[in-house]
Image (spheres, rainbow, N blue to C red):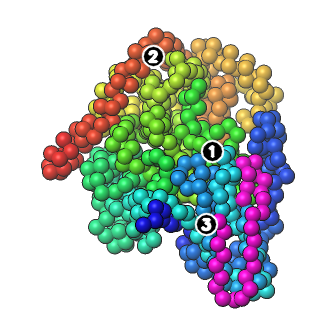
Amino acid sequence: MSDTVTRLLQRQIMPIDRDLDVMALYVDLEDARLDEDKYVVGGTQAAKDVNNATIRSVNGSGRKVQPEQVVDRTRFKVLPGQSVSFGSFFNGFAASYWRRWTVVDQVRLSVTVIGADAHVIVYKSLANGNSQRVEAAVTETDAATTFDFDLSLGPFVDGGWYWYDIVAGVTPAVVSAEWTAEVPADRADHGTVDLAITTMNRPEFCAKLLQQLGDEDLAPYLDTVFVMEQGTKLVADSEEFPAAQKALGDRLRILEQGNLGGSGGYARGQLESLAKGTATYALMMDDDVVCEPESIIRQVIFGDLARRPTIVGGMMFNLYSRSRLHSFGEIVQPWYFWWETPEDAFVAWDFSTRNIRSARWLHKRWDADFNGWFSCLIPLAVLREIGLSLPLFIKWDDAEYGLRAKAAGFPTVTLPGAAVWHVPWSDKNDGLDWQAYFHHRNRIVAALLHSIYPKGGRLLRGSRNNQLAHLVAMQYSTAELRLQAMEDVLKGPQHLHEMLPTRLAEVNAFREEFSDAQLVADRDDLPPVRRTKPTKKGKSISDVPSKRSMLISAGLAPIRQLKPMRPLAKEFPEAEVPAIDARWFKLAGFDSAVVSMNDGTAAALYRRDPARYRDLLKRTLAIHQRYRREWDDLAAQYRAALADVTSPAAWTETFRPWLPETDDEDNA
């Protein structure tokens, strides 16, 4: 018996619905152009800054894919004389990731072409984006011809891709391809996956997602789809649900429970998956995504062949700008303890503007600390070892889990070639609205658990400075919520489960008394702008202040807030401030202002309140001093309680009101 077997790693795919907006993620018709960003990888930050605008410029000839060129799910027609590259997000092969994280050391690319005199050219790239021709072949007849290329993964320590280009002859060339590898015989069988989807009042969105998961190619990999229904508008009541139910059959399970946030929904899915025990993985997925089903298959296969149990994440594209990538991998910056894209990478990258072959930075391997739970595959072996999600409601549950897994020896890989399209959060107000409480509380909890620096590094200083910025910007509701968040952390880890079902309602009720949290859809429902004096030298709110001016504002703004309000500002706002200009150093100069929200749906009246400011300032300084005194003891408390708080037993108690009696007894 052979000690190896052949496993399919990846196949050429085309968009299911022939959507032209995403075609750049599947094929590339443009010529590669790297000169503009030659300093990006390995260059100085100054060089990168200079190049930023240039490398985002359109690399365009106006060539477009015609819908009829998509023959079916796996085949693409190259028109006579046309050159097409499959060095794209979904069809390039991210060789450096496979080399670093899996048992695979060599792959076979099999390209099948129907059409005479078609050229197949295989390329590889280095971590700096430079490409090299590897092999080539030419078809001799119109009959289907398959070319096999055996390719080593040896040269991909730091980065690099494999891909293939097709140049058609005088007749069209229909192309399909597969990437395979010889792997140990004990890795012959593919794993299966449970999906955990948390939904809250998005019935149509969620039902359409469930339909996508009914893809026939995904079926062999799919065990159970758990939908944690936490809203009042039920997915089962959607007109789209019967089609979803038909597509998934008895693999679909709807579990109704109270609103426990994303973390409570995902933890329920994790608990159910562990209790059932028939799948290899549990995949966390948001309800407001459009799924590329092939991505789930690729995540499972990568997990199957990983050297050790590995969290495999999909990337996120913007649902409203479908070729725009959110991030190529995210980290938690340890000194500031804040999530971010690595410093020398880019966010919101548009592949229709510059594709993989024309962007050097996309060839470097990016190692992630965590993956967002919009599409994140977690081995059940990891869940058994380190526990379930923290009871954080929303925000930081995915980042904390990634850091916890990393500390236990389980890496996270954000896998190129796997992705979903997600509603972007860049247009939301989640740093100012009710979510500000969860942002701040959960970040501190995660830092107490995982910060490698004394007192959390720069976190406390940054927290204090951000709090002052909210105060001088008249964002008193946000400042109050952030203080409540810090006070709740001081209560200790045992309160996280207790607060989970009730804290959101309490936060929303508390915010209602603040004018800056009272959103108004019609601007005419707020008073008109009136000022005693015009702006200095007629300056616009959109003017960009100098660095010197900002430093002066930072020093004087906190003092100015102590002065009495201008009488007219008590009744009338002094300005209208668009969301894009609503920065603390601009708002700090007003006694009142109408400020619009990032999502464009409403505005709020900000009004300065010297008495409230004094109270909030005093409490802000006091609580940050307390944190500095008590950080070490608090961190020890949270770290000691982590295993218990994230255990199946603890979560079973939280879920008890919604568990059937039989499940309740089994899980207890």
Camera-nearest residue between 427 and 645:
645
User: Which amino acid lies under the numbered mark 2 shown in the image of this protein?
Assistant: Trp
Tally of numbered tags: 3
Q: Quadrant of residue 260?
A: top left
Q: Position of residue 1 (x, y in %)?
A: 42, 66
The amino acid on which the numbered mark 1 sits, given as a three-letter code, is Trp
The residue that label 3 is drawn on is 108
What residue lies at 62% left-to-right and 72% top-to-bottom? 110
- Percent across and percent down for residue 625 are 49, 11
Q: Is residue 612 above or below residue 68?
A: above
Disc with the residue nearer the chain's start (2 vs 1):
1
Q: Secondary structure at mark 2?
A: helix
Which residue is depicted at the point 43% across and 73% down? Answer: 216
Mark 2 vs 1: CB contact within 8 A: no
Task: Specify the farthest residue to the front.
Answer: 1
**Quadrant of the rendered image containing residue 197:** bottom left
Whether residue 93 appears in magenta in the rendering, the answer is no
Which label lies toward us, 2 or 3? Answer: 3
Pinpoint residue 3: horizontal percent, then vertical percent: 46, 61
| Amino acid type, residue under disc 3 in the picture | Arg
Magenta span: 124-150
Point out the tag, 2 or 3, that comes first from the N-terminus: 3
The circle on residue 366 is 1
Residue 29 in the image, given as x and y percentages of width and height: 75, 69
Q: Is residue 504 visible?
A: no
Left or right of 14: which side holds 628?
left
